[in-house]
Image (spheres, rainbow, N blue to C red):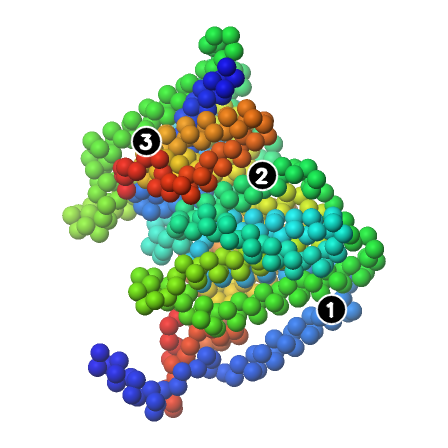
Amino acid sequence: MAWVNAIIQGVLTGGLYALFACGLSLMFGVMNVVNLAHGDLAVVAGYVAIGIIAVTHVPVLASFLIVVPVMALLGYVLQRTILQGALDRSVLTTLLVTFGLSVVIENGLLQFFTANSRAIGTGLSLVTGSFKLGSQIQIGYLLVVIFATAVVVLLGLQYFLSRSRYGRLIRAVADDKEAAQLSGVDYRHVFGIAAALAFGTVALAGVAYGMYSQLQPTTGTDTILLFAFAAVVIGGLGSLWGTLLGGVVLGVAQQIGAQINISDEVLAGYIVFLAVLVLRPQGLTTRRAQS
Amino acid sequence: MTVATDTTTRSEEEFRVTRSRRNVAWTGAGALAVVVVLAFFPYIVYSGTTTIMVQAFIVLTLASMWNLLAGYAGLVSVGHQAFVGLGAYFVLILAIHGTSPFAALPVAAIGCGVAALPLWWLVSRLRSGYFAIATWVLAATVMLVIEKFSSIGGGTGMPLPGLSGFSPTLLTADTYWAGLAVTVIALAGIYLLLRGRLGLVLTAIRDDETAARSSGARVGLARLLVFVVTGAGCGAAGALLAISQLQVQPGAVFSVQWTAEMAFATIIGGLGTIEGPIIGTAVYMVLQQTLAAYNAWYLIILGLVAIAVALFARRGLWGLVDEHLNVRLFPVGYWLRATGAPGRKNGK
């Protein structure tokens, strides 16, 4: 029964990891940018939420309504300025610049907010509450809500990319930005929109992680970025639904690892990641969706 | 085609291809003089200065290795802290079994070079950004595996044994000389590698990978060689770190901060030149020493400067010097010089 429980918990945390991963995957698929500051930006979103809740006393769930648009705007601005500047130079420059951003953000958080860990909405029944399945399996409401959010976000992204006008533009620019430019599309603006979408999901991921666990300045890299990347590779590069599958596989691997030895949770996830890298480098889903 | 033939016939009469405009022997003599002066430092300066110098040697070795990776082979690794950590742990393990840490240092470097082979096999299929994060995950995995062995300190680490027989003065001096030796070997090794066949292959790949492949350049082998050499170099720096800190902590030696430092020093100094990391290390040390009282601020400022340099002065501080003075201390490219006329740079 403990194993069944581990698998259920793993599947549900997979939703959280998919939320980490879809923004990373989107930015790579559309503008060929691997954003090494991805995780740190999620932590920034979490800290912003903590600040907003502390200052304005808005309900925890309402903080999303502020944090997501703020981060999306930041994404647009960052893409139109620094990231576009780096892209105009070379792909290597985007890596150097986003790595620089990552280190600067992480140490900045450390400097201003100390290394203490912070959580969001600890008093909420949604965060602490759980329900039982049978006698041994206990499932937190929060994980179910996060998983559902991840599915809704992925559905929304897919709908947006395949049906809406901007979605079509994003796909066109991802396929061939020069050709799109010739047809009268300002690809820089479209890149900005894609970055805004990605940063919106990043904000969701950061706040969700702050509610699920605790945020520290180092969480952005050692948990969010690396888990997001592992989920992307396991699921298959460039595939949106692959991130959910990858997240679920990673989550299950971690929970099974924890079941064997509580300290092996993270290691077990990375071992599965490395095995996929060696045995199936194209990922578990081979379908290429948005790239 | 006619133009090319034309140049070939003319080159015999009017053009000369040289490594440098100035005589390399002078640079060589200068470098030797600097090394000799540095070797006498423990006799003439306070031990506080040599301790800071050891730190500079570590950063310079790391930065030079990262420069070879990113600047010459185009491999942006964010996981070379794996080798810093492994180097430190090789020294620790050998010291526990009774080897002197100083004798263990070269063994640690070779061990890291060997360890680089399976790690390369895992990440070699990935390119650019995905390569960067994959190396990062790999470094995290290596740390988690090391932490599982409680005999070498588990998750908390342990002090480095085998150095209690040294007097503090002698230990500081020996550490300094070891650091100087590691740095000189690292820089000379990179210089010779880049002047040789590997340098040519890497330049060809940088200009056009497909063309290089179709001309028979062994691209995969060149990248493997670079990964192994930089693994060994970062391992030596990690071994030096263990000896200078007298303890090994997994969280500290496997910290991504090492990669941040090597990357920032290289970018600021100038990516893709041997002189760049030297200038970058100097900038790094000045900032770090000045802002020592303000915790992580030096890293924040270095990061911001590195971002600005990457965006606005891509060839770094050394690039600015080179642009105006045409100086190369370590010439690894070629000059095409018309006899009688001012020289013209070829390639870079």
Residue B178 visible in image:
yes
Q: Are marks 1 and 3 in contact (CB under 8 Å)?
A: no
Q: Which mark is residue B144?
A: 2
Q: Is residue A191 left or right of residue B114?
A: left
| Residue type, mark 1 in image | Phe
**In front of the other: A191 or A13:** A13
Q: Which residue is mark 1?
A: B41
| Residue type, mark 2 in image | Leu
Q: Which residue is mark 3?
A: A241
Q: Are marks 1 and 2 in contact (CB under 8 Å)?
A: no
Q: Nearer the viewer, mark 1 or mark 3?
A: 3
Q: Is residue B208 left or right of residue B305?
A: left
Instruction: Please give the name of the residue rendered at 62% of the width and 64% of the height, measured from the top-left corner.
Output: B183
Pinpoint the chain carrying mark 3: A
Q: Few, some or many C-alpha atoms within 10 Å of disc 3 (few <14, some 14-19, many ≥20)?
A: many
Residue A7 in picture, x, y percent from top left? 46, 22
Between the C-alphas of marks 1 and 2, the distance is 39 Å
Q: Is residue A83 above or below residue B63?
A: above
Q: Is disc 1 in the same subunit as disc 3?
A: no
Q: Is disc 1 in the same subunit as disc 2?
A: yes
Q: Earlier in the sequence, mark 1 or mark 2?
A: 1
Pinpoint the chain carrying mark 2: B
Between the C-alphas of marks 2 and 3, the distance is 29 Å
Instruction: Please give the name of the residue rendered at 51% of the width and 33% of the height, measured from the top-left corner.
Output: A268
Residue A252 in picture, x, y percent from top left? 46, 26
Pinpoint the chain carrying mark 1: B
Residue A19 in picture, x, y percent from top left? 40, 30
**In front of the other: A11 or A76:** A11
Q: Nearer the viewer, mark 2 or mark 3?
A: 2
Q: Few, some or many C-alpha atoms within 10 Å of disc 2 (few <14, some 14-19, many ≥20)?
A: many
User: Which image quadrant is residue A158 in?
Assistant: top left
| Residue type, mark 3 in image | Trp
